[in-house]
Image (cartoon, rainbow, N blue to C red):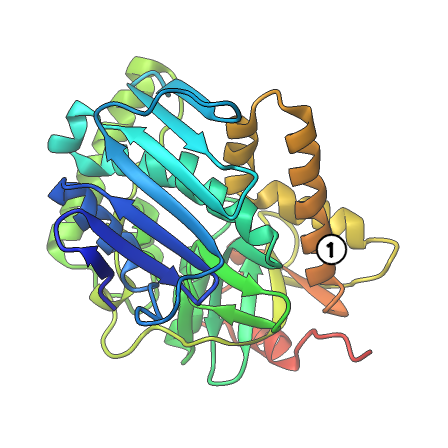
Amino acid sequence: MAPHPEHARSTSTYRFYGILDIVLHTEHAGWRRYFDNEYARISSDTGADAAALRVDVHITKRPPARQPGDIVRSERFKGLFRYSYVIRGIDTDHVTIWFREHPIDRVYMNAIGVYLQAQVLEPIVYAKLLQEDVLLLHAGGVASTDKGFLLPAYGGTGKTTLSMSLMAAGYKLLGDDLLFVELRSGRVHPYPRPLHVFTYNIRNLVDARIPTKYQVAVYTKNVLRWVLERVLRREFLISTRVHADELYPGDVFATAVPYTAIGFLRKTGPAVEEVRITEDNVHELADAIAASEDLNDSMLAILGPDSRRVAAFRSLEHDVIVRLLRQFDRLLYVNTRAMDLAHPEPLIAELERGSLATA
């Protein structure tokens, strides 16, 4: 769905399942296109009342004067561009971000947009949603009409390729990088952002038809990454962002469904291995899932040396993940490198058995 414009030129509201509103304030058309591309397919309930949680994002030439409690940051990210922002109301249900305009956003919006999204906005969203018993899980996921499978994962373990493999087997996509997991209702909502496609995805995405323009973009960025890594001597991941409905025919996205099984992707071990969830291991499993999250590290960087806020955030995150795991009686470890992704039937059989605790 398209975002709900409160003011035709400068404000767009993206509503996340009645729980969270993100409100973008800018007259820069490039920023509006970036947010539309990322969130318009997620945005829902555009005619509903405002959500209890709200994050306002102002793209501005000059952030406001600092007030008590503000978080003010300036960072040269990976030796490339310097970004500056102010966060106000971090302890409230209405957080405001002022992000300073950058000259590059007139030339290559993605380079700037990704920083704001991944290093500032979504870490704050992640932290605030925890207060509502919602886990913005770093995971792939697919669903049938009545079952949702959560596939949390460390980076580089095959979330996208496995999700696409399961789609080829008849499931619909919940998301390939983040899932909106609502503990109180036991439901997972789709989070259909663009897929992050790399060179290996061109070879491994089962049944996908990647248009030539995207293949060219992927290989061009691979060359750029190679150059940057050698010049700046640090690792870069530069993906090409493509929506799943540009790669697959028909209606590819799932609707909200009860989650019924959980499979944790890792780089070692057999293709599928079952672990019973008990009081003896639930905290260790929760720590592992927290370690696989991407957004919490960025949130800790935002909080900086504020030990009180850091401790509260870590405690809440751990508590929410533990309570999610306690809803299941088993967890599946999944190693996509040991699987035949063209024939995922053994994993599907285990996922279809379900994992929810019977008590």
Residue under label 1, please give it: 322
Q: In the image as oriented, which residue stretches furthest toward the right?
A: 280
What residue is shown at x 20% (from left), y 41% (from top)? 26
Position above or below: 18 against 93: below
The quadrant where residue 225 appears: top left
What residue is shown at x 76% (from left), y 75% (from top)? 357
The quadrant where residue 227 appears: top left
Position above or below: 53 against 343: above
What residue is shown at x 44% (from left), y 61% (from top)? 51
Return the x and y of residue 2 as percentages of the image width and height.
22, 65
Who is closer to the viewer here, 198 or 126? 126
Q: Tell me if I can see residue 237 in this picture.
A: no
Q: Tell me if I can see residue 279 in this picture.
A: yes
Please indicate whether residue 297 sits to the left or right of residue 287 in the image.
left
Position above or below: 179 against 299: below
Please indicate whether residue 123 sits to the left or right of residue 32 in the image.
right
